[in-house]
Amino acid sequence: MLNAGDTAWVLASAALVMLMTPGLAFFYGGMVRVKSVLNMLMMNFICLAIVSVLWVLYGFGETFSTDAFSGLIGNFHHAGFADTWGQLAGFATAATSTSPAVAWPGADALPVLAFAMFQLMFAIITPALISGAIADRAKFWGWALFVVLWVTIVYFPVAHWVFSFDGFIGPDSAGGWIANKLKALDFAGGTAVHINAGAAGLALAIVLGKRKGWPKDTGRPHNVPFVLLGAALLWFGWYGFNAGSALSAGDLAGVAFTNTTVATAAAVLGWLLVEQLRFGKPTTLGAASGAVAGLVAITPACGFVTPLGAIAIGVIAGALCALAISLKYKLGFDDSLDVVGVHLVGGLVGTLLIGFFGTTKVNSLGADGLFYGGGLGLLGKQAAAAVTVMVYSFVITLILGFLIKAAGGFRVSTEDEVSGIDEAQHAESAYDFGGSVLGGHSGATPAAVASAKDGAALEGSKA
C-alpha cells in the first residue's frame, strides 16, 4: 500500500540532497583562488547535468536492477527507467522476501520513481566531492569525461554493493554483496559516497600532481563567507541525505535527524579545540570544515546509534580530520581542498565506529557493536566494507586518471594555471575589478565580449 506522507518525505529529501551540490560548490568555491572560483563552481554544477542523464539511460538500471553477477553489478533491466513508473518498491511488496539489515521502517511501499530520484542525488554529489582534490589545475572537459567514466565504472557498481537490497525493487530482485552477503551497516552512504569519493580524490591528486608553487604557496581561500555559506547549505541539505534515508517520515527519520544535528555540532567543537591547541586560535574555515567532517562521519551511523553515540562520533571525527589534513604535507600529495582528510578519513571514522556504537535499541534491523555486547563481528564487517570500497575506488580512479592525462585532456598548462584557469577554460572571471569588457576581464560571456567589440567598431565607423 502506498503511503503519501512517506512518498512526500522522500521527494522532499531528494530536493534537499540536490541542494547539497550547489552548497558544495560554494563551500569549495570559497576556498579556491579568486582566478579559479568559476571553474570550481562549474566542476560541481556539471555533475548535475551529466549524472542525471546517465542515471536515466543506464545508471539506475546498473545500480538497482536485479543482480547480474555475484552481487557486483545490476543487470540493467531498468535502463531507460523501464518498468519504473506505476511500480512500487519496498519489502512489503514482496511477500516471500526477508528483510536484511536495511533502514526500512514499515509496511508501506514507495513509488520506484520517488526512490530513484532520491538515489540520483547521491549519485550526483559523489563525483562532485572529488573535484576539491584537484582544484586550480583541471581542464573542464577532461573533468567532465572523468565524471562520465567514473560514475559508470566506480560509483554505480559500488552503490549496487551498498544500497541494493534483495527484494526491495521487486519480489525476485537480488542486490549487492555488501548489503546482503557481508551485511555491513551503512545507513546513508559512508562507504558508497564518502570513502568512495575520498579514495578517488587521493588518486586524482596523485595523477594531476602538485599545483605550481605548492606547498610553499598553498593558495589562500578567496572568500571565507562563501565557505561558511556552503557549509550551512550542506548541513541543511544533509537532513535529506540522512533522515531521508529512513525512506519514511517516522521514528527512524527522527533519530537520524537528531544524530545528524548533534554529531555535526560536536565535530565543530572537536575541530576547533584541535586548532586552539595547535595554533592558538579557532578559525571560521575550521568551523566550516569541522561541520562537514561531522556530517560525513555520522552519515553511515545516523540510523544505528544513540544521540550520545553520535556526539562521540562527531567529536572523534572532528578532531581526527583536523589532524588528518596535515598528512598531505608529510606525504607530498596536493589534495587542494582536503577531500582526503575530511571525506576519506571522516567516512572511515564513521563506518568503523558503528562497530563500537551500533545498537539494536535504536534500530532492530541493525546490529550491536562492541560497546553493546556485540563483540568484534560487526567491526570486522565494517572494516571489510570500508577497505574494499577504498581500494577499488583508488585503483580504478588511478587508471582512469592516467588514461585521460595520457590523452592530454586533464591538466591545464602551467601558463593557464598561473594566469587564471577561469579565463583559460571558461572565458570568464568571477569578479569585475574594473577591467574593460573589450579586454575580456569583466566576467562577460564570449558572446557579450564579441557584441561589445562589434558595437565599438560600429561607433568608430560612424565617427
Image (cartoon, grey):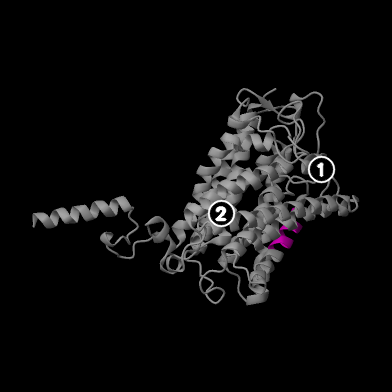
- Residue 351's x, y, as percent? 76, 53
In the picture, the quarter occupied by the C terminus is bottom left
Find disc 1 in the rendering and name its residue. Answer: 366
Mark 1: amino acid = Gly
Q: Which residue reaches farthest front?
A: 407
Asked if one can make out residue 9 in the rendered structure from this viewpoint, the answer is no
Q: Is residue 395 magenta?
A: no
Lateral position of residue 60 relative to residue 162, left or right: left
Q: In this view, does 187 lie to the left or right of 84?
A: right
Quadrant into which the N terminus falls? top right
Q: Residue at x 30, y 64 (%)?
A: 435
- Of the pair 404 and 194, the residue shown nearer to us: 404
User: Tag on residue 329?
Assistant: none
Q: How many marks?
A: 2
Q: Which amino acid does label 2 sit on?
A: Ala
Secondary element at tag 1: loop
By secondary structure, the bulk of the magenta-drawn segment is best described as: helix
Gap between marks 2 and 1 measured at Cα: 30 Å
SS class, disc 2 = helix
Q: Residue 196, image x and y in percent?
A: 67, 52
Dot 2 or dot 1, earlier in sequence = 2
The answer to whether one can see residue 210 in this image is yes
Asked whether 196 or 236 is in front, the reply is 196
Q: In this view, does 425 lie above or below 179?
A: below
Residue 419 relative to residue 135: left or right: left
Numbered circle sitting on residue 232: 2
